[in-house]
Image (tube, rainbow, N blue to C red):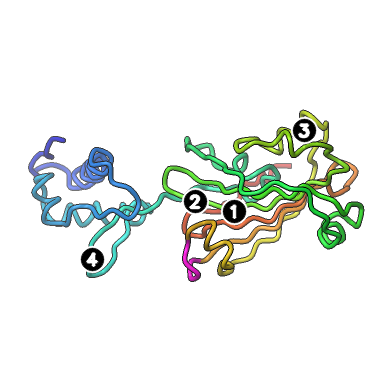
Amino acid sequence: MSKLPQSKGNPTFLYEEAIAHIRELIQNQNLHTGDRIPNESELCEILNVSRITIRRAIKELIADGALEVVHGKGTFVKASKTQLHLLNLKGFTEGLSSEERNIQKSIISKKVVLNPEIGRKHFDGRYTEFIELVRKVFDEDGYLSLDYAYLPTELYPNIESKIEDQTSTFQLIKSTYNVKFARVNKEIEYSLPTPEICELLNISKTSPVIRVKKNIFDHKNEPIHYSNYYLIAERVKLYIEADYSE
């Protein structure tokens, strides 16, 4: 990586160039989440710019969520945040922003369960037997969420044999069972994780999570899908985009 030119030009240009070169340094040195980057003095030497320029570049990278400062220890690479559209009624990965990310899913468990309480609370008492599907969602920076989904066996016979790690249940339900999603209801709350969530997502008991309870309905307004998933709060940015045109 080449050094930056001496600071005779536009200072804004210099700190933006410094940002680009720090990102390049992180990539070239194969630094990952939790790794420490060179300190200010070292970066000044590497990039041949002033401490003011480096401080501005680091400040912008912290604001962008790429770096974090641990006082007394240094500046570290921070896990990037993934945007999730709150109004999207589809699955987790379908609700992600359009940015290119290598989102992966991994099945923890997949089994038939009798759960009258789920049926009563989320399916108007229509069903008592479900496929309980538990999956973790992750990217190159680590875990993003843990998802508990409940699919009535009466609506989706033999669906458990069709679900693999990367299967989109939304697409599977639509294409194989010809069931169309029409409306979604989401309840969102901020909480601390249970011991099970801590273990499965490898987070501490003080790491906040965002719990999302999601019920999906068809065009007859009948409940056809329920999921309860937990997002690692520091890994996601929730957003809403709505069209107000008449």
Residue at the image position 47 percent from the left and 66 percent from the top = 204
Residue denoted by label 3: 174
Mark 3 secondary-structure assignment: helix
Label located before the other in sequence (2 or 4): 4
Between the C-alphas of marks 2 and 4, the distance is 25 Å
* Mark 1 vs 4: CB contact within 8 A: no
Q: Give the residue type that dot 4 points to.
A: Lys
Q: Which amino acid lies under the numbered mark 1 shown in the image of this protein?
A: Leu
Task: Answer with the quarter of the image where residue 210 lies.
Answer: bottom right
- Depth check: 107 or 212 in front? 107
Q: CA distance from mark 3 to mark 4?
A: 51 Å
Identity, as a three-letter code, of the amino acid under mark 2: Tyr
Name the disc covering residue 73, or none.
Answer: 4
Residue segment shown in magenta = 203-207
**Between tags 1 and 4, which lies in front?**
1
Q: Is residue 83 left or right of residue 25?
A: right
Q: Amino acid at mark 3?
A: Lys
N-term mark: 2 or 3: 2
Q: Secondary structure at mark 4?
A: loop
What whole-number distance in Å separates the C-alpha atoms at marks 3 and 1? 23 Å
Question: Does the magenta segment cover residue 209?
Answer: no
**Which residue carries the number 1 mark?**
146
Query: Which SS type dominates the magenta stretch?
Result: loop
* Gap between marks 1 and 2 measured at Cα: 8 Å
The alpha-carbon separation of the residues under discs 2 and 3 comes to: 27 Å
The quarter of the picture where the N terminus appears is top left
Q: In the image, 113: left or right of 134?
A: right
Q: What residue is shown with label 2?
A: 143
Which quadrant of the figure contains the C terminus?
top right
Query: Reading the chain from its start, which is encountered first: label 3 or label 4?
Result: 4
Q: Tell me where residue 19 sits by quadrant.
A: top left
- Residue at image point 15% right, 50% down: 43
